[in-house]
Image (spheres, rainbow, N blue to C red):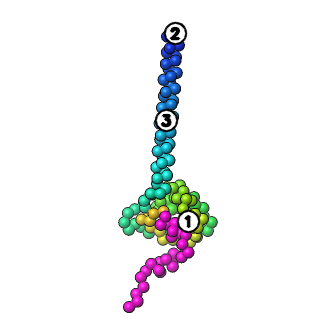
Amino acid sequence: MDFNKALFGFIRVAFSIMIALLVLFAGIKICSICYDFGYRVFTEPAMTNGDGQDVLVQVEKGISAEELGQLLEDKGLVRDHNLFYLQLKLSAYSGHIKPGIYTLNTSMTAKDMMVIMSSDKSDEEQTQTAEPSDTQ
């Protein structure tokens, strides 16, 4: 009888240790995922390096930050719409995105896109002011 009690006690302790290790490893994994996501909020690079590719984006009046993130992900301008949503919500541009048609580029960061979409100039005005004038 003592052997059975000792065996049962050993199994119970071993099982408790395995559960504790499982919880520990799960906690470490969750913390790692959260850290990675939080790090990317502030350091996410542009989709491409160099010149990139121009993409026309039409922002409708009343579009939510989540919908805008999904639109930019569908157009290939951001990797993760949830990340863009969080970047927008944490930025000074939250609630300041203006409806319109914008020419964005895959070499732009999320912040660059937010600056353009929250500016008072329309796409046509930006194109005109970006071209140098010939005054000779």
**Position of the C terminus by quadrant:** bottom left
Residue 112: % across, % down? 47, 66
CB contact under 8 Å: marks 1 and 3: no
- Earlier in the chain: of badge 2 and badge 3, it is 2
Q: Residues within 10 Å of mark 3 (few under 14, many from 20)?
A: few
- Give coordinates of residue 60: x percent, y percent: 59, 68
Q: Could you give the CA–CA distance between mark 2 and mark 3, rounded to whole angstroms?
A: 33 Å
Q: Is residue 117 above or below residue 17?
A: below
- The residue beneath circle 1 is 93
Residue 13 location (% of width, % of height): 50, 22
CA gap between label 1 and label 3 equals: 39 Å
| Viewer-side residue, 34 vs 46 | 34
Span colored in magenta:
111-136
Q: Which residue is mark 3?
A: 24
Amino acid type, residue under disc 2 in the picture: Asp
- Asked whether the residues under the numbered discs 2 and 1 touch, taking CB atoms below 8 Å apart as contact, a structural biologist would say no
Q: Is residue 123 magenta?
A: yes
